[in-house]
């Protein structure tokens, strides 16, 4: 069963997700050559606590940190450590917050200084895929409409769409029904209803879609070592398309217009 959230619940989900958006904007601004991923994580944890939230990832199935920071070939679930971020790399930042009984979850990938054209295209395309997915999160559409538009957007650029990880419903649990694949499974899936809340999160690779998980049991890297991007928003299904809960005014993502590529 997919939960339909009341406007009161959506209000709290928005508060949780606003903390996430604020943290992401701050961390994105701190991505500079020489910074380590654990330095970013420390800032995030402090910000979340200061706002009365709880880092949702920490302790989740034993995950050890407040954030996932996934540099270059790391797709998702990069554990913050002493890895130094270098100029020209791309850095995915994923943050989850538990606040007043509800979850917020969003992610963004940012460049460290100037990046090459292929990385730029990867970021633009993944952001566009999320933007189109948000538009497709409208009442009366089917879940597969979201999956298909993401896959189509990325396949056009010949990028590898990750299949091993998916988006998800979000609410009083971080991961709820439904699962949201970023590719066409061949099934129509459930009809989207006003008040469903889902985290849309395309993960897209410059090369192969294939994934390898490192011995730590978390770090997911591309099988060919090429860079990967990840953009995520938590979204309410509405008549006019998805309402983004995790949006932030200083760092804009998931709002790309068609034709801008
Ligand atoms: N945003 C990711 C997700 O939805 C990260 C959570 S994994 C965790 O699955 F283990 F770090 F919590
Ligand atoms: Co998520």
Image (cartoon, helix red, strand yellow):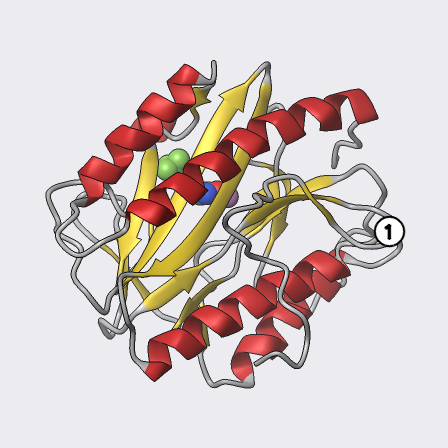
Q: Quadrant of residue 38?
A: top left
Q: Position of residue 50 (x, y in %)?
A: 40, 16
Viewer-closest of 13 and 213: 13
Quadrant in which the C terminus appears:
bottom right
Residue 102 appears in the figure = yes
Q: Quadrant of residue 138?
A: bottom right
User: Which residue is at 15% across, 40% downward?
Assistant: 81
Count neighbours of disc 1 (C-alpha within 10 A) and say few if under 14, some if 14 to 19, many if 20 or more. some
The percent coordinates of residue 77 (x first, y second) are 32, 46
Which residue is label 1 attached to?
139
* Image x and y of residue 94, in percent: 40, 44
Q: How many marks?
A: 1
Look at the picture and state if 164 lies above or below 227.
Answer: above
Name the residue at 24% across, 75% down: 224
When the figure is inspected, residue 213 is found, relative to residue 151, above or below; the finding is above
**Point 12% across, 52% down: residue:** 34
The residue shown at (59%, 40%) is 246
Q: Is mark 1 within 8 Å of ligand 2?
A: no
Where the N terminus falls, by quadrant?
top right
Counting from the top left corner in percent of width and height, residue 109 is at 40, 57
- Residue at disc 1, secondary structure: loop
Q: Is residue 41 left or right of residue 191?
A: left
The quadrant holding residue 137 is: bottom right
**Would you place residue 166 above or below residue 37 in this image?**
below
- Return the residue nearer the eye: 67 or 89: 89
Residues 146 and 181: in front is 146
In this view of the protein, can residue 6 be seen by the observer?
A: no
């Amino acid at each position: 069963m997919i939960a339909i959230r009341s406007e009161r619940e959506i209000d709290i989900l928005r508060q949780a997700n606003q903390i996430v958006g604020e943290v992401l904007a701050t961390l994105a601004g701190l991505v500079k050559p020489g910074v380590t991923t654990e330095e970013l994580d420390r800032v995030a944890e402090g910000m979340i606590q200061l706002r009365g939230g709880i880092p949702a990832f920490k302790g989740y199935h034993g995950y050890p940190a407040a954030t996932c920071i996934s540099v270059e070939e790391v797709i998702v679930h990069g554990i913050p450590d002493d890895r130094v971020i270098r100029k020209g790399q791309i850095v995915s930042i994923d943050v989850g917050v538990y606040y007043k009984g509800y979850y917020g979850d969003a992610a963004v990938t940012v460049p460290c200084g100037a990046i090459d054209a292929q990385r730029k295209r990867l970021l633009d395309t993944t952001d566009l895929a999320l933007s189109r997915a948000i538009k497709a999160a409208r009442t009366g559409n089917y879940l597969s409409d979201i999956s298909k538009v993401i896959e189509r957007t990325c396949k056009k650029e010949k990028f590898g769409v990750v299949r091993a990880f998916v988006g998800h419903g979000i609410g009083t649990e971080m991961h709820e029904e439904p699962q949201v694949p970023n590719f066409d499974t061949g099934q129509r899936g459930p009809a989207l209803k006003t008040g469903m809340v889902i985290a849309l999160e395309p993960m897209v690779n410059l090369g192969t879609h294939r994934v390898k998980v490192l011995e730590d049991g978390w770090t997911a890297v591309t099988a060919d070592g090429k860079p990967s991007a990840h953009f995520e928003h938590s979204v309410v299904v509405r008549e006019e398309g998805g309402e983004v809960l995790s949006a932030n005014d200083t760092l804009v993502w998931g709002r790309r217009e068609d034709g801008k590529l």
